[in-house]
Amino acid sequence: MLLAAGATPLAAQPKSDWETAREERDWKENAFTLPVYPKAADLVEIYVGEATSFKFFVDPASVSVGDDGVVRYTLVARSSSGAENISFEGLRCRSGIVRAYAFGSRDGRWTPGRTEWRPIHSKGAQGSQFILWRNYFCPHSVPIRDSADGISALRNGGHRDAPRAEMFGR
């Protein structure tokens, strides 16, 4: 019993830089399937800030998290004139990177268009992805547990573990 108690702290120690770098180097993305095309009535709005004239929405039915640490979701960006950009995207929580897998077309279908992984930025066109990464799907760079955890975050205006003081730029 004393031996087991003495081993517990070792299991809780953080990974070394070498271990983290090796995991990053050996990482492989899981296969996935495109979600059902989003319906306007099902979308949940996320607040990105006042610096954009676009409104952003996520389809809760599309939210998933793989054992590869990637949270996938459908994002809808709607302009003040009603024009929409729809994309199916993935966030790699630990690395703070994002990629698009497919784009929505006018006929309600997905057009494959896999982009390269790129860093998430808090300003500009990627502001919505930064908010999703930090406040909804990857609080503290840790992926949500499952789709229900992500859906709950969407419905509650953010994940319960998100850094509250920074949530909306405050």
Image (cartoon, grey):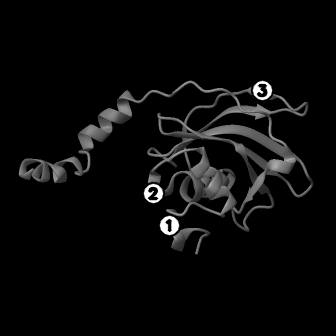
User: In which quadrant of the rendered view does residue 24 lie?
Assistant: top left
**Residue at the spot x=47%, y=35% of the render?**
67
Residue type pointed to by label 1: Pro
Q: Secondary structure at mark 1?
A: loop
**Label 1 with label 2: CB-CB less than 8 Å:** yes
Q: Secondary structure at mark 3?
A: strand
Please state if 71 lies on the left or on the right of 60 as rendered.
left
User: In which quadrant of the rendered view does residue 94 lie?
Assistant: top left
Q: Where residue 58 appears, x then y in whole percent?
A: 72, 49
Residue placed farthest to the front in the image?
A: 1
Q: How many numbered discs sit on the rendered protein?
A: 3
How dense is the environment of label 3, judged by Cα within 10 Å: few (below 14), some, or many (20 and up)? Answer: few
The answer to whether 10 is drawn above or below residue 23 in the figure is below
Residue type pointed to by label 2: His
Residues under labels 3 and 1: Cα distance? 35 Å
Of the numbered discs 2 and 3, the one sitting upstream in the chain is 3
Q: Of residues 142 and 147, which is closer to you in this image?
A: 147
Of the numbered discs 3 and 1, the one sitting upstream in the chain is 3
Q: Which mark is residue 140?
A: 2
Residue named by callout 3 = 111
Residues under labels 1 and 2: Cα distance? 8 Å
Residue type pointed to by label 3: Thr
**Residue at the spot x=75%, y=52% of the render?**
57
Q: Where residue 70 appears, x then y in whole percent?
A: 53, 38
The answer to whether 74 is drawn above or below residue 25 in the figure is below
Q: Of residues 86 and 138, which is closer to you in this image?
A: 138
Residue named by callout 1 = 163
